[in-house]
Structure formats: C-alpha cells, structure tokens
Image: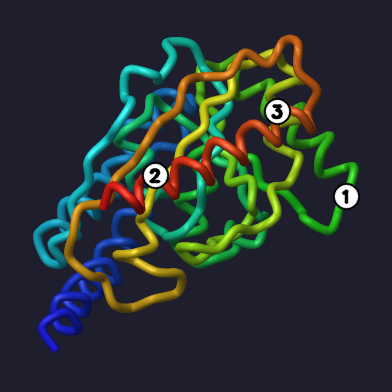
C-alpha cells in the first residue's frame, strides 16, 4: 500500500509538471540546440529528484571514467523509463534515437522534438537506417552524444531482446567510439509499471570501443555480449 501511495504521489506531480514545463521548453525554440539542452534537461533532473524523494529510488554509477571526452554513440540496455531520465544527468549533452510516434504525444512529444532527436519511422526499412546515419553524423558533428537502445523497446529484467544493427551501423559508418551501458533499472521501475519500488539502481559503463576496424555486425555482437554479461555480473553482485 505504501509503495502504491508513493508511486501515486510521483505520478501526480509528473502529470502536473510535464505540460507546464513543455510549454516553457517551446519558448526556447529560437535558441540553437546546444543552448536549449540545459533547459530541456531540467525536466529529467527534476523527475529524478522527485523519484528519489517520493519512491526512494537512487542510483550509483560504475565506470564513469570510461565516458569519453569526444561525442560518441551510446548503446544502452533498455529496461525502464528511468534510464531516459538518468542518462541526461550521467552523460554529456545527448540526443536519442527514438520511434517517430513519440513526437505526437501531447506536451511530452513537443518537448522531445525540441531536443533534436533522431525520430525514426520503423517501417521505413533501409531509409530509416540511412536517416539514422545521416542525422547521427550531424548530431555528432554538433557535439552531441547519440543514445541508441539497440533492442528498440524496453525488455524485462532477465530477458534479452534482439539487438538491432542501427546503432552499430551509425558508429562504424562515422568511426565514432561506441559506449556500452548496462543497468538494472527494470527491477525497480518496470515496463509500463505504475509501481516504483525503492532501491539503488546500478549503472555500469563499459570501456569505449574503437570502431574504425570493425564491421557493424561484429560491433553489435561485442556490445550485446558485454551488456548481457555485465547484467549477469550485476545480478550476482546484488
């Protein structure tokens, strides 16, 4: 009952704060993307603070020293909505690769559109991959990290989805470093779950992978092996 009430308290504030803040973000439209970014991330930082205060969810980061100085392609496990908030605080300025439909969500989608995302039509096939590489190169050139969830959707803890090639293709075509990230956020905030359970999420950042001599499928395999192996290690550690 206590967890339900605390989760409700978090949700009520989120429902009230998000529309108001997204309207504020729209006012930053005349600014270049790099100037808009610090304003946009206030929302995520506020949600993380409120999540800790109401639901008792905190986090720790292993391997923060592995974050490179130059923009790179981030390949991250996707278990929860939590990592979409936390990565904005853990990593330098970033853009996400996401499904285009998210931009149509009232208020929230408008705020996302202001963050210069790479919004993909999943049904577009090769055209979607071409868009990912072209726009990804553009965002890297502008100094943004590009965050990709290779599985494409949130996967429950203990499960493994198909690691799609898009993020690896972007990294190898642009010769950008690939940064693998594993975490266990799904144990505390599950997919489509209203309930949020207190605890400490562990985020593990692997060593960046030099992609200049790799093909996309080989990079994809390396990233999958590291992430899934690290998840097992985190589970044993817990």
Q: Of the residues tagged 2 and 1, which is closer to the observer?
A: 2
Residue furthest right as drawn: 126
- Image height of 152 relative to 133, above or below: below
Identify which residue is drawn at 45% across, 69% down.
Answer: 191
Identify which residue is drawn at 70% across, 35% down.
Answer: 220
Q: Is mark 3 on a helix, strand or loop?
A: helix
Distance CA(mark 2)–CA(mark 3): 21 Å
Residue nearest the observer in this picture, 114 or 177? 177
Distance CA(mark 3)–CA(mark 1): 20 Å
Residue 219 disc label:
3
Q: Quick one: label 3 or label 1, which is nearer the N terminus?
A: 1
**2 sits left or right of 19 in the view:** left
Q: Of the residues tagged 2 and 3, which is closer to the observer?
A: 2
Tell me the quarter of the image containing the N terminus: bottom left
* Quadrant hosting residue 86: top left
Q: Where is residue 76 in the image (x, y as percent from the top left)?
A: 51, 41
| Residue beneath disc 1 | 125
Identify which residue is drawn at 33% across, 78% down.
Answer: 194
User: Is residue 228 something that shows in the picture?
Assistant: yes
Q: Quick one: label 2 or label 1, which is nearer the N terminus?
A: 1
- Image height of 105 relative to 128, above or below: below
**161 sits left or right of 190 in the view:** right
* Quadrant hosting residue 96: top right
Q: Position of residue 33 (x, y in %)?
A: 48, 28
**170 sits left or right of 232 in the view:** right
Residue 233 disc label:
2
């Amino acid at each position: 009952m206590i967890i339900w009430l605390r989760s409700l308290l978090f949700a009520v504030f989120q429902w009230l704060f998000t529309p108001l803040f997204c309207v504020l973000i729209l006012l930053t439209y005349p600014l270049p993307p790099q100037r808009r970014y610090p304003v946009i991330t206030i929302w995520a930082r506020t949600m993380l603070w409120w999540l800790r205060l109401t639901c008792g969810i905190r986090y720790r980061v292993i391997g923060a020293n592995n974050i490179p100085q130059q923009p790179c392609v981030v390949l991250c496990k996707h278990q929860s909505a939590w990592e979409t908030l936390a990565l904005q605080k853990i990593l330098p300025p970033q853009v996400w690769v996401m499904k285009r439909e998210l931009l149509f969500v009232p208020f929230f989608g408008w705020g996302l559109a202001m963050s210069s995302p790479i919004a993909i039509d999943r049904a577009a096939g090769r055209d979607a991959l071409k868009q990912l590489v072209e726009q990804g190169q553009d965002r890297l050139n502008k100094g943004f990290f590009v965050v990709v969830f290779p599985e494409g959707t949130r996967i429950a803890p203990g499960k493994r989805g198909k690691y799609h090639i898009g993020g690896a293709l972007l990294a190898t075509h642009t010769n950008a470093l690939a940064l693998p990230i594993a975490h266990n956020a799904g144990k505390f905030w599950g997919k489509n779950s209203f309930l949020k359970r207190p605890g400490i999420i562990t985020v593990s950042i692997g060593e960046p992978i030099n992609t200049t001599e790799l093909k996309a499928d080989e990079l994809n395999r390396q990233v999958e092996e590291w992430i899934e192996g690290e998840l097992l290690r985190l589970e044993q550690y817990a």
